[in-house]
Image: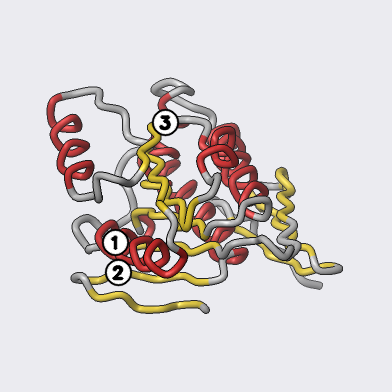
Amino acid sequence: MYTIQQPTIPILITVLKNGEILFLVLYGEKIYYPERVVMEETGNMGKVILVLGGTKSGKTSFAQKLAAELATGKGKNVTYIATAWGLDEGMKKRIAVHRSSRPKKWITVEEPLEVSGILGKAAGNKAAVIIDCLTMLSTNILMELGENPDAEEALRRVTSEVKAILAQAVEIEPDLIIISNHVEAGLVAPTRLGGIFQDIAGISHQIIASAADTVYLMTAGIPQKLKG
């Protein structure tokens, strides 16, 4: 007889069935949240590119370089979806620095919570769309749940938006470049909220990476291709 020890952290199970990617999240004593992403190729479907990296690893610069090359090759512009909220002076300065680093002709759209809802319109006649970044988007959704959020609800909310973004990705023509901080690679967070955030980030990255055409990990400004 075998027994299975119940996990204390979320575990993502990926199953491929009939061309569909099925995601099951095992948390505590039950598989509570089924996630399904159908990546059905069409003639106009762009690629999904995930760029992971730590703080100041060069991930944004690299993503912008990829987008600029696509824009040159296709003769089209780029849409930059910025998810940061300028809630304090430090964040406002950071946003200003990021904005100044982008070509002025690029279109910037600020959306802190519902990127999936504006992705289709933002992608119109573009070479690439950049989402910068998934980490901040997840943070904003988590903040909406208060200082002591339910871990399962927080995970459900964020992964639901991730699923919706990937569902939109199959409907748009430009390549979609998603930037995110590789926070799950560091030390285990000392606080409950920090732990929830790390779990959400790790599972979200696994979902996107499973569906993505290409995945890069940035270290000291050097891209390492993990997939594609």
Say if 94 sits above or below 31 in the image: above
Q: State the residue in front, 171 or 207.
A: 171
Q: Would you call the spot at circle 2 few (<14 residues within 10 Å), some (14-19), or many (20 or more)? A: many
Across and down, in percent, residue 42 comes to 74, 63
Residue at coordinates 17% horizontally, 44% vertically from top-left?
100
Q: Which mark is residue 142?
A: none
- Write down the residue under mark 3: 112
State the image quarter where residue 64 is shown: bottom left
Residue type of the residue flagged with mark 1: Lys
The residue lying toward the viewer, choosing from 166 and 80, is: 80
Look at the numbered discs 2 and 3 and tell me whether their residues touch, using CB distance below 8 Å: no
Question: In the image, residue 173 lies at what x, y percent?
Answer: 60, 56
Element type at mark 1: helix
Badge 3 vs badge 1, beta-carbon distance below 8 Å: no
Mark 1 — residue? Answer: 59
- Give the distance between the C-alpha atoms of the residues marked 2 and 1, in whole angstroms: 6 Å
| Mark closer to the chain start, 2 or 1 | 1
Who is closer to the viewer here, 124 or 117? 124
Quadrant for the N terminus in the image: bottom right
Image check: 186 left or right of 205? left
Residue where numbered disc 2 is placed: 218
- Within 10 Å of disc 3 (Cα), the crowding (few <14, some 14-19, many 20+) is some
- Give SS at disc 2: strand
List x then y, in percent, for residue 140.
41, 31
Mark 2 / mark 3, whichever is N-terminal: 3
Q: Amino acid at mark 3?
A: Pro
Tell me the amino acid under the disc marked 2.
Answer: Met
Disc 2 + disc 1, Cβ < 8 Å: yes
Q: CA distance from mark 3 to mark 1?
A: 19 Å
The extreme front residue here reads 75
